[in-house]
Image: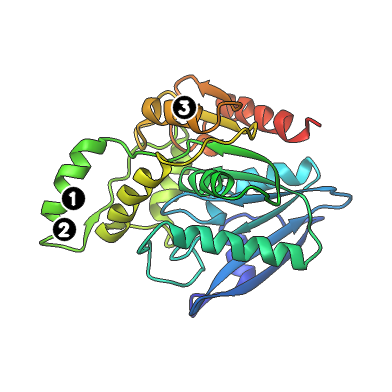
Amino acid sequence: MKADFDITTYRENYNLPVENVDHTWEFIDYKDFQLFFQMFSPPKAEKTILFLHGFFDHTGTHSEWIQYLMTKKFNVAAFDLPGHGQSGGPPFEVESFQEYQEALRSVLEYLREQGVTDVHGVGHSTGGAVIADYLLSNSTTLFHKAALISPLIRSNKWWLSKMAAPLVSTFQKEMPRTFRRHTGESSFMKSLKQDPLEGKTIPFKWVNAMFEWEKEMMEKTPSSKPVLILQGTNDQTVEWKHNMNVYHTLFPESTRILIDNGRHHLLNERKAQKDIIYRLLLEYLNKE
């Protein structure tokens, strides 16, 4: 938790739902720090979604998505990944992606303790990768369904990064973040750049952890889970063509849908594209 954290200011800054919504929050003990967990519950909601954000982001980044789910009568559970948002831990840094798995398990256990027994997982980018890894690593899970949005396997310009990182990391521990155009919605990009909780540098420790995780994922036994995967064709953050092929192998029963000209932040795209994306997700999550 940041020293100056105030829940009212936080909700206002990120336009999180408050009207006709029961918003609870908790700092869940995890290792030697805490994870910032939130639950948004509209009246008469029956299904629960656990949402995981991507690298650099946090739950508040996706407030419009959460607002939408409130109107569709879903409970939304969400937490900031270690080192992100209001969660503790070294900023945007992990020794291994296994730390994300441990954090997810801690939150799922917390949900079980609260009486939640059936969850739909939705994850964006690294958040989608964390959910995918969890499904591939656990034969029994709390997840009934899972939707992966622009999921990570390899980042863009993968081989250039693999060659450059060992050299550059001998001289510096991190490098400046380049704010690519993650969406066609200019107002979202402006707010992203101005967000004080957004990461501004990339630790090489995280990059090296990603390299190791990618190799581990390639050795996973495929799952028959019928996940939904949405991917934009103008995504310059991940190597989406390669990634979609890998996810096809890992989840052969998955439904994979390409969003024409969609960029990386599909949940925050221009309205015309966003309407399609939200509809596809809603149809999948509501289907029995």
Is mark 2 in CB contact (under 8 Å) with mark 1? yes
SS at badge 2: loop
Q: Is residue 237 left or right of residue 46?
A: left
Is mark 1 in CB contact (under 8 Å) with mark 3? no
Mark 2 = which residue?
169
Local crowd size for mark 2, using a 10 Å CA cut-off: few (<14), some (14–19), many (≥20): some
SS at badge 3: strand
Local crowd size for mark 1, using a 10 Å CA cut-off: few (<14), some (14–19), many (≥20): some
Mark 3 = which residue?
232
Rendered location of residue 23, percent (x, y)? 74, 63
Rendered location of residue 24, percent (x, y)? 73, 67
Q: Which mark is residue 165?
A: 1
Quadrant containing the C terminus is top right
Measure how far apart labels 1 and 3 are at the Cα level.
27 Å
Vertical order, 75 against 150 (above or below): below
Rendered location of residue 259, percent (x, y)? 51, 23
Instruction: Please report the residue visible at 62 percent of the width from the left and 54 percent of the height from the top.
Output: 15
Q: Which mark is residue 262?
A: none
Instruction: Please report the residue visible at 15 percent of the width from the left and 53 percent of the height from the top.
Output: 166
Instruction: Please report the residue visible at 63 percent of the width from the left and 47 percent of the height from the top.
Output: 139
Measure how far apart labels 2 and 3 are at the Cα level.
31 Å
Is mark 2 in CB contact (under 8 Å) with mark 3? no
